[in-house]
Structure formats: C-alpha cells, structure tokens
Amino acid sequence: QVRLVESGGGLVQPGGSLSLSCAASVSGFTFVTMGWYRQAPGKERELVATITTSESTNYADSVKGRFTIFRDSGKNTVNLQMNSLKPEDTAVYYCRADSRSRRVYWGQGTQVTVSS
C-alpha cells in the first residue's frame, strides 16, 4: 500500500515563505511524475507544480517565479518551496504521485493559510 505523507503547511503572512514536503512510503519504486495540487474552499482542485524523473517541471501561471518544485527520485520525495505568498495561495495542498502503470496516488493534504 502506497502512502504519501505531507508536511510543512501552516499560517504565514503575505510575502512570507513556506516549504512543503511529501514522502512516499515505498522503496525500490520510482514514480514517473510527482507534484502538488491545491484546493481552495468552493473551488476545484488545481495543479500547482509537477516534476518528472528527468527533472522536467510544469507550473501553474499563478505561481511561476514564486514557487519551486524539486524531488529526490531515489527517496521518492517531492518538495515545494513557496515564496512571496499571497492570500490567494490559501488552500489545502495535496501531494500527488503517478506510477508507470498510470496509477495515481494522493496525500491527505496539508493546509496553507496566507493571512495577516
């Protein structure tokens, strides 16, 4: 059973920074793509950033230049460094991992609140 465990959410003031981490409870297994999605109240879940095993990245336009995604494929971990946070970044952030067999795994989510 694959589990994704997220950590690092919390409350931060506008302009501040947070770092999210996600670790998969599996070894000897590499996910093709890992990434972060978020869901704000009353809105659909949306892509934030993804990264492949070849380190190819994809970012939502709203976070480009502010967020950075990086991973350690050997350890099946993915991190999201979030800088210059805005109130509209407030959401539950979910880690996602896609296997070679196209199975999709989700973490339980971690709350990020940007407020003064």
Image: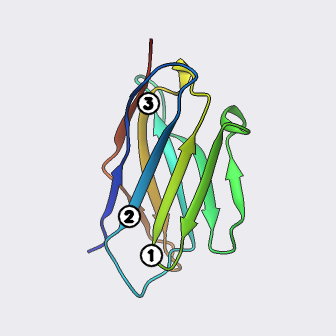
The disc label shown at residue 13, or none = none
- 28 versus 80 height, above or below: below
**Which quarter of the picture shows residue 55?**
bottom right
Which amino acid is tagged 1? Lys
Callout 3 secondary element: strand
Between the C-alphas of marks 2 and 3, the distance is 20 Å
- Whether residues under marks 1 and 2 lie with C-beta atoms below 8 angstroms apart, the answer is yes
Q: Position of 55 compared to 37: left or right? A: right
Between the C-alphas of marks 1 and 2, the distance is 8 Å
Give x and y (percent) for residue 49.
61, 49
- 62 versus 81 height, above or below: above
Between the C-alphas of marks 1 and 3, the distance is 27 Å
Callout 2 secondary element: strand
The tag earlier along the polypeptide, 1 or 3, is: 1
Other-residue count near label 3 (Cα within 10 Å), few / some / many at <14 / 14–19 / ≥20: many
Q: Residue furthest bottom?
A: 28
Location of the C terminus (image quadrant): top left
Give x and y (percent) for residue 33.
57, 67
Q: Please name the residue that numbered disc 3 is placed on.
A: 91
Residue that appears at 50% across and 80% down: 74
Q: Position of 2 compared to 43: left or right? A: left
Which amino acid is tagged 3? Ala
Give x and y (percent) for residue 66.
67, 36
**Which quarter of the picture shows residue 62?**
top right
Q: Please name the residue that numbered disc 2 is placed on.
A: 23
Residue that appears at 53% across and 27% down: 16
Q: Please name the residue that numbered disc 1 is placed on.
A: 75
The tag earlier along the polypeptide, 1 or 2, is: 2
Which amino acid is tagged 2? Ala
